[in-house]
Amino acid sequence: MPGDSPGITVVKSWDHAGMRATGSHEVIFNHVRVAAEHAVDVWPADAPPAAQAEPFRLFANRQTALLAAIYDSIAHAAHDWLVRWLAGRVPAGLGHPLSRLPRVQEKVGQIAGLLLEQAAALRFSAIEANLAKVTITDNAIQAVNIALELTGNHGLSRQNPLERHYRNVLCGRVHTPQSDSAWLAAGNFVFQSQG
């Protein structure tokens, strides 16, 4: 619907620690009419489709692919910056780049393992798609956390992009589905499928 339709009010409430280049202001709809041809997935309020219906499954897969890709990409950007920084950082007492230290190489390998790319190809059930979003987001956060462990104060400095990547990747936890609801649905499904 057009943003200037009667009854639409935008409350400029977006003031977020991460993702400062985006905006998720509140939108209040007060008796706003939506033409039937502009509505998505119309059904009677008292007869919604089942949770495992095909439209929900496809939505969950597409949401997982798109939303998780954002946070996975943030973690990849953090990884790329970290690798360049470690290769160029030569502490005075060490005499060579941090990238040569076995501990650093191990941690960068751990990050690489967390960021293995998996293609969903729209084959997940809605429950599996939600678990994939949570897992990919958690792995992205863990990968950036490891990068921060390796860089210390340098990683938290606003002069380096890792600080921004960290703020941005943390935002993944608040997007639907959140981990508790995804895990609850998956656990419930496991027990229901047992008997």
Image (cartoon, helix red, strand yellow):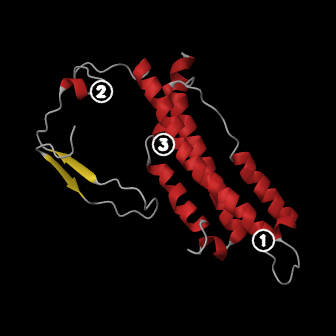
The residue under label 3 is 180
Q: Amino acid at mark 2?
A: Val
Q: Is residue 195 rendered to the left or right of residue 42?
A: right
Q: Nearer the viewer, mark 2 or mark 3?
A: 2
Badge 2 density bin: few <14, some 14–19, many ≥20, Cα 10 Å: few
Q: Is residue 142 visible?
A: no
Residue 38 point in image, percent of width and height: 24, 28
* Helix, strand or loop status at disc 3: helix
**C-alpha span from label 2 to label 3:** 27 Å
Q: Which of the marked residues, 1 or 3, is nearer the chain's N terminus?
A: 1
**C-alpha span from label 1 to label 3:** 40 Å
The residue under label 2 is 40
Front one among 100 and 149: 100
Q: Farthest bottom residue? A: 92
Q: Which of the marked residues, 2 or 3, is nearer the chain's N terminus?
A: 2
Q: Quadrant for the N terminus, please.
A: top left
Q: Which residue is rendered at x = 65% and y = 52% of the image?
A: 76
* Helix, strand or loop status at disc 1: helix
Q: Quadrant for the C terminus, please.
A: top right
Q: Which residue is rendered at x = 20% and y = 24% of the image?
A: 36
Contact (CB < 8 A) between labels 1 and 3?
A: no
Q: Amino acid at mark 3?
A: Asp
Quadrant in the rendering for residue 123: top right
Checking the image for residue 88, the label placed there is: 1
Contact (CB < 8 A) between labels 2 and 3?
A: no
